[in-house]
Image (spheres, helix red, strand yellow):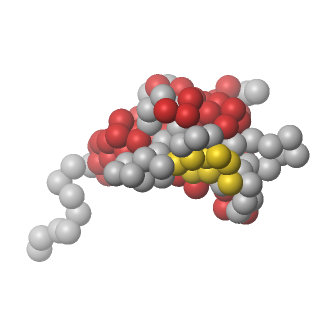
Amino acid sequence: MSSDLPSESFKVLYERHFDMVYRRGWDSTLGGGIWWENDEKVGKNACVNGPAAIAACYLAKATGSDSYYKIAKEILDWEIENLYCDDGAIDDNITIGNNRSTYHATYNQGTFIGAFMLVHEKYGD
């Protein structure tokens, strides 16, 4: 009986796809961060960067590579610099021209907190 599962391990696929997303999505525009859309490159959103930081932490655990924890920390540092508010909320996005959307989706708050919890497990601060 044939299997619909890929011939490569899920860990290898996970690593390949994360690396692809990070390479094409992260750049120094707006101080870093991952683009919401790669074709238009209009803004960088919390709903992309928070989950990417979480994925990087889980990939670090799966592969044993601390380089993914460094990526997660880099993403969180960018979110703090560009989307974090004095009251602890995370703004939705920042666009070219440094315009910030002050919409505060619970999803964005949750992925920000979740990413920080995973980075804290590694670094302890």
Residue 3 drawn at (x, y percent): 17, 68
Give the residue drawn at x 74%, y 59%. Answer: 104
Front residue of 115 and 44: 44
**Residue 68 falls left or right of residue 74:** left
Q: Is residue 104 above or below residue 81?
A: below
Residue 18 can be seen, yes or no: no
Q: Residue furthest front?
A: 97
Front residue of 124 and 110: 110
Front residue of 88 and 73: 88
**Residue 53 falls left or right of residue 113:** left
Give the residue drawn at x 34%, y 51%. Answer: 39
Residue 87 drawn at (x, y percent): 88, 46
Residue 95 can be seen, yes or no: yes
Count of numbered labels shown in the rendering: 0
Give the residue drawn at x 44%, y 36%. Answer: 26
**Residue 33 falls left or right of residue 65:** right
Q: Residue furthest right?
A: 87
Residue 42 drawn at (x, y percent): 48, 49
Residue 93 drawn at (x, y percent): 62, 50
* Occupied quadrant, residue 85: top right
**Quadrant of the image containing the C terminus:** top right
Q: Residue furthest left?
A: 1
Give the residue drawn at x 11%, y 74%. Answer: 1
